[in-house]
Image (cartoon, grey):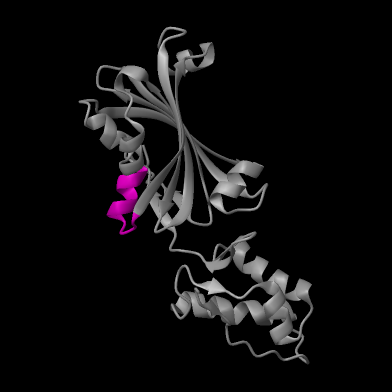
Amino acid sequence: MEPTYEPEITLDRDSQVPLYQQIAKPIETAILSGALPAGAMIEDEVSMASRLDVARPTARRALQELASRGLLTRRRGVGTRVTPPHVHRPMKLSSLNDDLAEAGFSPTTRVLSYEVREASPEEAEKLSIPRGEGLLAVRRLRYADDHPLALMTNLIPLDIAPTWQELGENGLYRCLAARGVEVTSARQVIGARGASAKEAEDLGEEEGAPLLTMERTGYASDGRVVEFGQHVYRPSLYSFHFSLFTS
């Protein structure tokens, strides 16, 4: 059975510092110092409240404070874990899978759905293909060191579509490159919104939790649209980095 950590916490009940802060602070210190490693399971709020002789809402607030700052990840039915290192992704035309590998993470992918069908009018417009032409609609869950990081939904013209197995083993751009297709430019929009119930379940977040969003249209050198993607990311684990210059 996986060990559960019980952080060493000393409470001063005469202090004016709220008890939840007295609980959260030593846990934060242990995480930032590396004493509590990424992925470590922390005792649940019921056990913590009993051990420290505090009310359950006090223990819950302490853990939630740390979760809201990205130090802990809480998932119903799974438990509370120390969040893995944050993924800082450069704003460049690249594959998330390759970026994670270059940053020292171990990326893995689970293909959640793989559907070959006719393009709807809206989808045909996004891919600049005739209405009714075939496409691949695929949805994947990308992990960084076994932690769910991003949900990726892509539309790809059928004649260059990778197989289920290929998409489970490699990033999309590497799959396209194997077919002689190089993505040389893209139009990209970054945003944010709350997580749906299904997204929250897949990513280990609470429903309504903030998510980063990215919508990307990728082009080959001849101007052909080769992919349209709509991705969501956990901001507690992920951020985009921009370089800005004066004109």
Chief SS of the magenta region: helix
Q: Position of residue 185 (x, y in %)?
A: 31, 28
> Is 86 left or right of 66, judged from the image as shown?
left
83 up-or-down from 158: above or below? below
Residue at 57% in and 54% down: 204
171 up-or-down from 6: above or below? above
Quadrant assignment, res 5: bottom right
> Is 71 left or right of 13, judged from the image as shown?
left
Membership of 213 in magenta stretch: no
User: What residue occupies the far front of the structure in this picture?
Assistant: 1
Q: Position of residue 70 (x, y in %)?
A: 55, 62
Quadrant assignment, res 55: bottom right
Quadrant assignment, res 130: top left
Count of numbered labels shown in the rendering: 0
> Does the rendering let one see residue 194?
no
Magenta segment boundaries in residue numbering: 96-106
Q: Quadrant of the C terminus?
A: top left
Nearest the camera: 124 or 242?
124
> Does the rendering let one see residue 151?
yes
Nearest the camera: 57 or 159?
159
Residue at 26% in and 36% down: 174
> Is 155 left or right of 48, judged from the image as shown?
left
Q: Position of residue 143 (x, y in %)?
A: 42, 51
Q: Position of residue 215 (x, y in %)?
A: 48, 32
Residue at 51% in and 77% down: 3
